[in-house]
Amino acid sequence: MKAGWEVKELSDCLDAFKISAKVPKKKFKAKGDFPIISQETDFINGYWDTAEDACVIKKPVVIFGDHTQIIKYVDFNFVVGADGVKILNPKEFLEAKFLKYFIEANPMPSLGYARHYRHIKSLPIPLPPLAEQKRIVSILDEAFEGLDRARENAEANLKSARELFETTLNSALSIHHNDQLKAGWKVQTIGDVTVLENGDRGKNYPGRKAFVSSGVAFINAGHIAGGKIDWAQMNYIPEEHFQRISRGKIVKDDLLFCLRGSLGKFGHVTEDFKGAIASSLVIIRTTMKIDVNFLKHFLDSAHCTEEIEKYAGGAAQPNLGASDLKKFTISLPPLVEQKRIVSDLDRASRVCTDLQTHYTSKLQDISDLRQSLLQKAFAGELT
């Protein structure tokens, strides 16, 4: 511990703070005289007009989201929103922003929607003299201003990298939107160029009681993400139960499409092994008219999303049937052209993935540097 520094428990560094009122989220207004501060991510979460409900600030305070661990430095009058807002009112010997940075320097694992303040209130906080606290805050403010600009640029570039491939993909697959097809292209339906097969929904459908620790894979919508199948979290049924199932058995190069739950997501069966699908999925099995990888790109496209919205409707939990999926339209060039387009799109995907990896790594570096500066600050190593 540096000379002149002392250590106190966090709770011993706080004064009580009277909250005038708590406004439920459903009552938040879009405009008003007083901003509402809650435990949500956005700094200001709504507005309120009643002056009697406002917290009048004489000096800055720190807002801690008891459920979310969101931390906010507030130096203006505000109204408290909803539940879970802890107002940390530092005593005269503690600078509010120094307190904010201390909490950020000591993150704890999320406990879900449980309360977190009870786990941090006894943290030992190192306390230099007030003048030194202000000096440290000034250094961190300046450093974090630069890091925030770098983070914003990296996030913008990451978003652009994602959008670049989406633009390339949608441009390659949406030719018929102009009603002017290239020579050799045809507008077909999914039903024209594939065979769809639902799972067995009869008496042989495996309920949870049929699941075993190992056996034949039984795949549901929860196992589908990003064009792949999550085999690590798979459910299994016994071989003898699999033999009783009459349909919905997978083969290599099948695409498994989610009809409800994660509507529109799909997974590609890339290996030749046994498995069956749950009723939340449908097998899309390609014919000689369409390349399976061309179809995968179509399922990722904006046009496919439009078709899903067209046939799924606006229900609270929309779903499709195989008969709806058959009606989806798709612009198809000859098979040789399909393979060329797939090659071009795969190459563009690799470039965009490399860019995303680069900017994701950069964001992690920025986060690591921020934490490193915080650790140095509370060890008395900032000069």
Image (cartoon, rainbow, N blue to C red):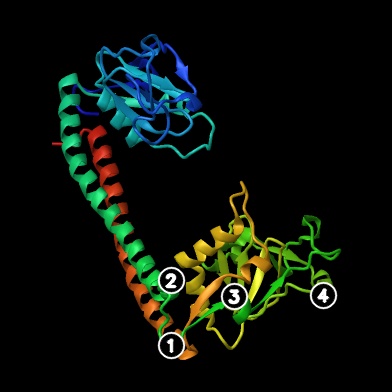
Q: CA distance from mark 2 to mark 4?
A: 45 Å
Q: Are marks 1 and 3 in contact (CB under 8 Å)?
A: no
User: Residue 65 sits in which quadrant?
Assistant: top left
Q: Is residue 313 left or right of residue 61?
A: right
Q: CA distance from mark 2 to mark 1?
A: 19 Å
Relative vertical location of residue 375 with respect to residue 263 in this rendering, above or below:
above
User: Residue 99 sits in which quadrant?
Assistant: top left
Q: Nearer the viewer, mark 4 or mark 3?
A: 3
Instruction: In the displayed orientation, state which residue is furthest to the left.
Output: 383
Q: Nearer the viewer, mark 2 or mark 4?
A: 2
Relative vertical location of residue 266 with respect to residue 289 in this rendering, above or below:
above
The residue at 21%/33% (across/down) is 380
Look at mark 3 in the image and give the residue it sits on.
190
Query: Which comes before the other along the chain, label 4 or label 3?
Result: 3
Q: Give the image location of residue 239, x and y in percent.
A: 79, 72
Question: Which quadrant is the C terminus positioned in?
Answer: top left
Local crowd size for mark 4, using a 10 Å CA cut-off: few (<14), some (14–19), many (≥20): few
Say which mark, if any, is on residue 44: none
Look at mark 4 in the image and give the residue it sits on.
243
Q: Is residue 119 left or right of residue 260?
A: left
Q: CA distance from mark 1 to mark 4?
A: 40 Å
Local crowd size for mark 1, using a 10 Å CA cut-off: few (<14), some (14–19), many (≥20): some
Look at mark 1 in the image and give the residue it sits on.
337
The residue at 38%/25% (across/down) is 37
Query: Which comes before the other along the chain, label 2 or label 4?
Result: 2
Q: Give the image location of residue 174, x and y in percent.
A: 43, 72
Look at mark 2 in the image and give the residue it sits on.
177
Looking at the rendered structure, the kind of residue marked 1 is Glu
Asked which secondary structure carries label 3, the reply is: helix
Q: Is residue 233 visible?
A: no
